[in-house]
């Protein structure tokens, strides 16, 4: 059991590391590169691809959360054991910080490089589009809600087996396409924490929103999913009981 937990935690660590390094790395290193910058469209796909690739690489080990809000949302939905919640979140945050450190070391090797926001999330003056606190809060709650709604739906019984990573990755891409101008897109407290620690100042002061709002959205999705899939669970139980009687 101890070795199983270790494998799960390590999977979450590396999965979150890759998500932050790939997604934030695209924003910091490639988005505005002269003449060939990938822009926020490229950044959106970078985040989606990190989740897609790691979902298939280690999702079968830990479930492929890579996000404290996802872990809490799945726990709320009854899809994550209580004993996994805290270890997963710790691994995710550490993975995000390590990724931000590696990204800082790479980016700072360029002469004249200025960190700026370092792909951090923010509201008000720190929002890419200067959106206010209320707009940013609603955006993070709603976007995280739909992210969890898709995750839970595509990994439920009856969904196409083995393909969940594709819609989940595409959903995260779509979320970034919509909300990069608003908050620079978090929907992931660990992803927000790593870069903010290196950007410093007000970015750290605003971290509270990018923990609270995603978790609220995830919990709402988890509770709704419990209700939506309750009938499915009852039907499954009845089928099992009927099979026992007939055999």
Image (cartoon, rainbow, N blue to C red):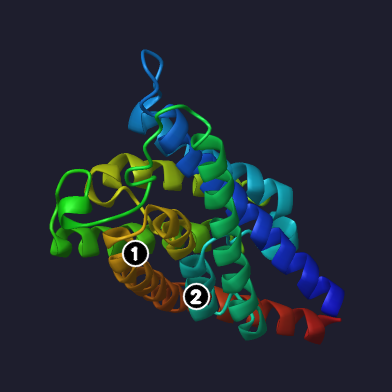
Residue ranking furthest to the front: 111
- Rendering quarter of residue 135: bottom left
Q: In screen coordinates, is 48 left or right of 18?
A: left
Q: In screen coordinates, is 55 left or right of 226?
A: right
What quarter of the picture does the C terminus occupy?
bottom right
Depth order, front residue of 64/89: 89
Above or below, 32 against 54 in this view is: above
What quarter of the picture does the N terminus occupy?
bottom right
The answer to whether residue 155 is seen in the rendering is yes
Residue ranking furthest to the top: 35
Counting residues from the start of the chain, the first of labels 2 and 1 encountered is: 2
Closer to viewer: mark 2 or mark 1:
1
The local secondary structure at tag 2 comes to: helix
Q: Which mark is residue 204?
A: 1
Mark 2, other Cα within 10 Å: few <14 / some 14–19 / many ≥20: many
The local secondary structure at tag 1 comes to: helix
Mark 2 — residue?
72
Q: Residue 41, image x and y in percent? A: 36, 30
At horizontal 80% and vertical 84% (from top left) the residue drawn is 244
Depth order, front residue of 188/141: 188
Mark 1, other Cα within 10 Å: few <14 / some 14–19 / many ≥20: some
At horizontal 58% and vertical 62% (from top left) the residue drawn is 65
The answer to whether residue 166 is seen in the rendering is no
- Rendering quarter of residue 215: bottom left
Q: Residue 173, image x and y in percent? A: 42, 41
Q: Residue 211, image x and y in percent? A: 38, 70
Q: Which mark is residue 103?
A: none
Q: CA distance from mark 2 to mark 1?
A: 22 Å
């Amino acid at each position: 059991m101890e070795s199983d937990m270790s494998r799960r935690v390590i999977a979450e660590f590396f999965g979150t590391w890759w998500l932050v390094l790939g997604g934030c790395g695209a924003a910091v290193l490639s988005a505005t590169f002269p003449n060939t910058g990938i822009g926020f469209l490229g950044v959106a796909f970078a985040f989606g691809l990190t989740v897609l690739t790691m979902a298939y690489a280690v999702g079968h080990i830990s479930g492929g959360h890579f996000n404290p809000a996802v872990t809490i949302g799945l726990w709320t939905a009854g899809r994550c054991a209580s004993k996994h919640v805290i270890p997963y979140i710790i691994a995710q945050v550490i993975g995000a910080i390590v990724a931000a450190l590696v990204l800082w070391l790479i980016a700072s090797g360029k002469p004249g490089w200025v960190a700026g926001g370092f792909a951090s999330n923010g509201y008000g003056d720190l929002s890419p589009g200067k959106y206010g606190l209320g707009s940013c809060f609603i955006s993070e709650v709603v976007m995280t809600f739909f992210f969890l709604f898709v995750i839970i739906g595509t990994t439920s019984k009856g969904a196409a087996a083995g393909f969940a990573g594709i819609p989940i990755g595409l959903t995260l891409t779509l979320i970034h396409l919509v909300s990069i101008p608003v908050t620079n897109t978090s929907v992931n407290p660990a992803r927000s924490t790593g870069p903010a620690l290196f950007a410093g100042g007000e970015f750290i002061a605003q971290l509270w929103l990018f923990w609270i709002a995603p978790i609220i959205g995830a919990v709402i999705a988890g509770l709704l999913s419990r209700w939506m899939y309750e009938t499915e669970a009852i039907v499954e139980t009845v089928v099992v009981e009927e099979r026992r009687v007939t055999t």
